[in-house]
């Protein structure tokens, strides 16, 4: 196995587990991740997923370039944007309707496809020794797993173009300053910090979390009137749910709400 997957209560933990190659992603890993994301989405007990890399050197340095070189030499077609037709499709970077929040726990290098994977998560919590980059331009490649599209949307345009067109690296403090990272802490406090964010996500009403995520991501490029008028599947479920009444009742009774997710 190249991915370690564990569940505890309402939390799923997904660990890219190839520390000997800085968690570079090969085709087998993509296949395993696809099955895991399917399971997380289908399991109503899971409310949040934490994605990280094994070891203390890297979240992931992206695609396994040795494998890519072997595939190219064997006549495999060159890849471009997206993963359709390749193992693991749709990958997290293309699961645009994935409804549950995913927290990226980044410690060390998040480069290339590894950074693209983190950008596809809903929150990023990073250690202060983390380093980010999309170096594909220096390899004659493009950030085809969404890096081109997400970076220009998630940071100021000139800054994004600078990093996209040069492949320059930047540290966690810079990522935080641009709003790419939610919080930066010393490595020794990383797990504690992630646990705090996860606890807050689990304490939130699960249908509200899914409704808000869907509405926020689907409406980001819509004119404001169209955003209000759009149909949101998870919001429709939330407003007809028992949880919609439970939250108010718990508040008035000054007790902790008991979320059923129904």
Image: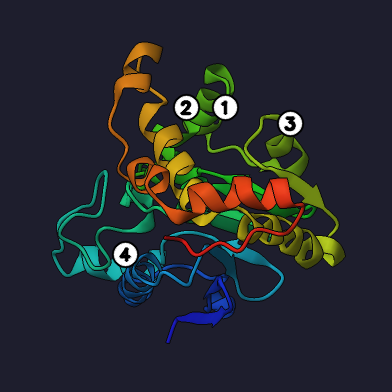
Residue 155 has which mark? 1
Pointer 1 with pointer 2, Cβ within 8 A: yes
Q: Earlier in the sequence, mark 3 or mark 4?
A: 4
C-alpha separation, residue under disc 3 versus residue under disc 1: 10 Å
Q: Are marks 3 and 4 in contact (CB under 8 Å)?
A: no
Query: Would you name the residue on which mark 3 appears?
Result: 177
Q: Secondary structure at mark 3?
A: helix
Residue occupying the point 77% across, 52% down: 254
**Mark nearer the N terminus (4 vs 2):** 4
Compared to residue 226, the image places residue 20 above or below, namely below
x then y, percent, for residue 108 = 69, 60
Using a 10 Å C-alpha cutoff, classify the residue at mark 4 as few (fewer than 14 neighbours), some (14 to 19) or many (20 or more).
Answer: some
Say if residue 155 shows up in the picture.
yes
Q: Of the residues tagged 4 and 2, which is closer to the observer?
A: 2
Give the camera-side residue of 247 and 139.
247
Earlier-in-chain disc, 3 versus 1: 1
Left or right: 195 in relation to 63: right
Q: Which mark is residue 68?
A: 4
């Amino acid at each position: 196995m190249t991915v370690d997957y564990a569940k505890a209560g309402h939390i799923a933990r997904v660990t890219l587990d190839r520390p000997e190659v800085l968690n570079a992603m090969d085709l087998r890993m993509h296949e395993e991740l696809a099955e895991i994301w399917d399971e997380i989405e289908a399991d109503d007990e899971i409310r949040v997923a934490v994605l990280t890399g094994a070891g203390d050197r890297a979240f992931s340095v992206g695609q396994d370039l040795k494998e890519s070189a072997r595939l190219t030499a064997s006549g495999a077609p060159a890849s471009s944007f997206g993963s359709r037709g390749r193992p693991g499709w749709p990958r997290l970077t293309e699961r645009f309707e994935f409804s549950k929040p995913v927290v990226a726990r980044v410690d060390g290098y998040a480069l290339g496809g590894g950074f693209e994977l983190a950008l596809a998560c809903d929150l990023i919590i990073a250690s202060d020794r983390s380093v980010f980059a999309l170096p594909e331009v220096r390899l004659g490649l493009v950030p085809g797993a969404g890096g081109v599209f997400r970076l220009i949307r998630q940071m100021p345009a000139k800054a994004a173009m600078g990093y996209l067109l040069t492949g320059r690296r930047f540290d966690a403090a810079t990522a935080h300053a641009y709003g790419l990272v939610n919080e930066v802490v010393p490595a020794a406090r990383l797990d504690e910090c992630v646990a705090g964010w996860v606890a807050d996500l689990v304490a939130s009403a699960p249908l509200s979390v899914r409704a808000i995520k869907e509405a926020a991501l689907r409406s980001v490029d819509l004119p404001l009137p169209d955003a209000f008028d759009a149909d949101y599947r998870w919001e429709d479920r939330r407003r007809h749910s028992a949880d919609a009444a439970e939250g108010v009742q718990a508040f008035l009774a000054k007790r902790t709400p008991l979320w059923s997710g129904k």
